[in-house]
Image: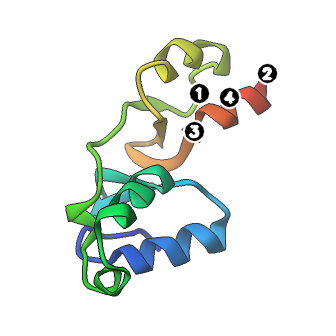
């Protein structure tokens, strides 16, 4: 199930924990509208009361949509792109099918 901008930080933390991931894309319907990361959530935690996590919506903490590449893009071309972004969304047939992070590219090499 895709995360929506109106879901809460609490929802994202649970989903990220279940999936053992550090970043998760946020969708409005089928369109990606942003990304929430552990790093961003930790920064938000430093300035937010924990009780607000159940109310704070993802649209208030997400970052902009990262670059999107086609699923058949060679892994060895991703290094330069990841110098400028924390993650890359992967699309196939105009649908987002995955997310690649810097640690993923290290495992691919």
Label 1 – label 2 distance at C-alpha? 16 Å
Location of residue 7 by image quarter: bottom left
Q: Which mark is residue 72?
A: 1
Q: Residues within 10 Å of mark 1 (few under 14, many from 20)?
A: few
Q: How is the image coloured?
A: rainbow
In what quadrant of the picture does the C terminus appear? top right
Q: Residues within 10 Å of mark 4 (few under 14, many from 20)?
A: some
Q: Which mark is residue 109?
A: 2
**Residue position for label 3:** 100
Label 3 – label 4 distance at C-alpha? 7 Å
Location of residue 101 by image quarter: top right
Label 4 – label 2 distance at C-alpha? 6 Å
Q: Which mark is residue 105?
A: 4
Could you say which is closer to the camera, residue 46 or residue 76? 46
Label 3 – label 2 distance at C-alpha? 13 Å
Q: Are marks 1 and 2 in contact (CB under 8 Å)?
A: no
- As helix, strand or loop, the secondary structure at mark 3 comes to strand
- As helix, strand or loop, the secondary structure at mark 1 comes to loop
Foreground tag (1 vs 4)? 4
Could you say which is closer to the camera, residue 5 or residue 31? 5
Q: Is residue 27 left or right of residue 10?
A: left
């Amino acid at each position: 199930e895709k995360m929506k901008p109106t879901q809460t930080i609490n929802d994202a933390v649970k989903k990220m924990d279940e999936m053992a991931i550090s970043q998760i894309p946020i969708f409005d319907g089928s369109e990606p509208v942003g990304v929430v990361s552990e790093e961003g959530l930790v920064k938000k935690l430093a300035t937010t009361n924990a009780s607000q996590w159940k109310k704070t919506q993802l649209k208030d903490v997400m970052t902009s949509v990262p670059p999107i590449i086609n699923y058949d893009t060679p892994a060895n071309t991703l290094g330069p792109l990841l110098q400028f972004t924390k993650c890359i969304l992967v699309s196939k047939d105009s649908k987002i099918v995955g997310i690649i992070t810097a640690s993923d590219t290290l495992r691919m090499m």
